[in-house]
Amino acid sequence: KQEVTQIPAALSVPEGENLVLNCSFTDSAIYNLQWFRQDPGKGLTSLLLIQSSQREQTSGRLNASLDKSSGRSTLYIAASQPGDSATYLCAVPYSSASKIIFGSGTRLSIRP
Amino acid sequence: DAGVTQSPTHLIKTRGQHVTLRCSPISGHKSVSWYQQVLGQGPQFIFQYYEKEERGRGNFPDRFSARQFPNYSSELNVNALLLGDSALYLCASSGEGNQPQHFGDGTRLSIL
């Protein structure tokens, strides 16, 4: 059974800092891993998707890495801004590409 | 292009009633998935439909059902509503193969 864990549950840092969010999963047989952002009361916005054959993906100030053997992924945010404040969720497909298992998320707050 | 659209955005029901939630996928996407997100947790997979057929089902009671129409839009039905069904219901669509899922803004369902 696939389980996805995100640590920490909440994080508060001052503006401008670089930060890392962690995601771990128990079953390394994954199709891909996806990072999402969720603003309060809103749906999910896809940030990055890493295919199982890839080690990392980058988009602007975001960089996501994937280590299947250790069951870990990290989301690196450079030069954080108050607008980055949101909940960040990682997710992996399980048993089919469209059945996604989510972590509980990390609630990020960037202080001006 | 329009993203995934869900209706209604908010809904208030009482225990024992039934509800129908609607989702229109991104144009060209044939796969639709439904998720339930309780406050403070990550989304939980409910159903996946592809080409009008159910392709996956999560650990939800038979009170939950869904269907997909020829235009690939989808409905989620929940009967005999319970207080615990209060949640944000998210719909996601995806293209062929191992493509990322795109989420709508969800329907906020409150049970009184």
Image (cartoon, helix red, strand yellow):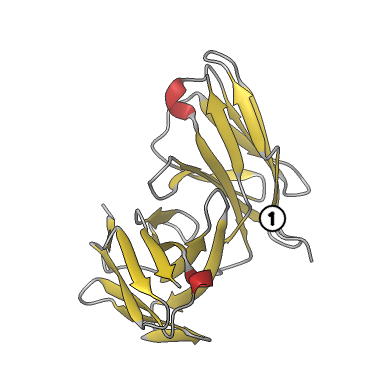
Give the residue at the far top of this rendering. B16
* Mark 1 residue crowding within 10 angstroms, few (<14) / some (14–19) / many (20+): many
Please give the name of the residue rendered at 67% of the width and 40% of the height, measured from the top-left corner. B9
Output the chain of dot 1. B
* Residue B98 visible in rendering: no
Residue B78 or B96: which is nearer the viewer?
B78
Please give the name of the residue rendered at 49% of the width and 71% of the height, measured from the top-left corner. A82
* Image location of residue B15, percent across then percent down: 52, 15
* Image location of residue A13, percent across then percent down: 34, 72
Instruction: Give the quadrant of residue A75.
Output: bottom left
* Image location of residue B52, percent across then percent down: 66, 45
A26 horizontally vs A111: left or right: left
Instruction: Assign the C terminus of chain A to one quadrant of the image.
Output: bottom left
Residue B87 or A102: which is nearer the viewer?
B87
* Amino acid, disc 1: Val
* Residue B90 visible in rendering: yes
B35 horizontally vs B106: left or right: left
Please determine whether, in this image, residue B15 is positioned above or below residue A33.
Answer: above
Give the residue at the far left of this rendering. A70
Residue position for label 1: B4
Please give the name of the residue rendered at 56% of the width and 68% of the height, measured from the top-left corner. B97
* Image location of residue A62, percent across then percent down: 46, 82
Please give the name of the residue rendered at 44% of the width and 48% of the height, measured from the top-left corner. B43
Please determine whether, in this image, residue A109 is positioned above or below residue B46.
Answer: below
A31 horizontally vs B104: left or right: left
Count the numbered circles shown.
1
Regarding mark 1 in the picture, which secondary structure is present there? Answer: loop
Please determine whether, in this image, residue B2 is positioned above or below residue A50.
Answer: above
Residue A112 or B52: which is nearer the viewer?
A112
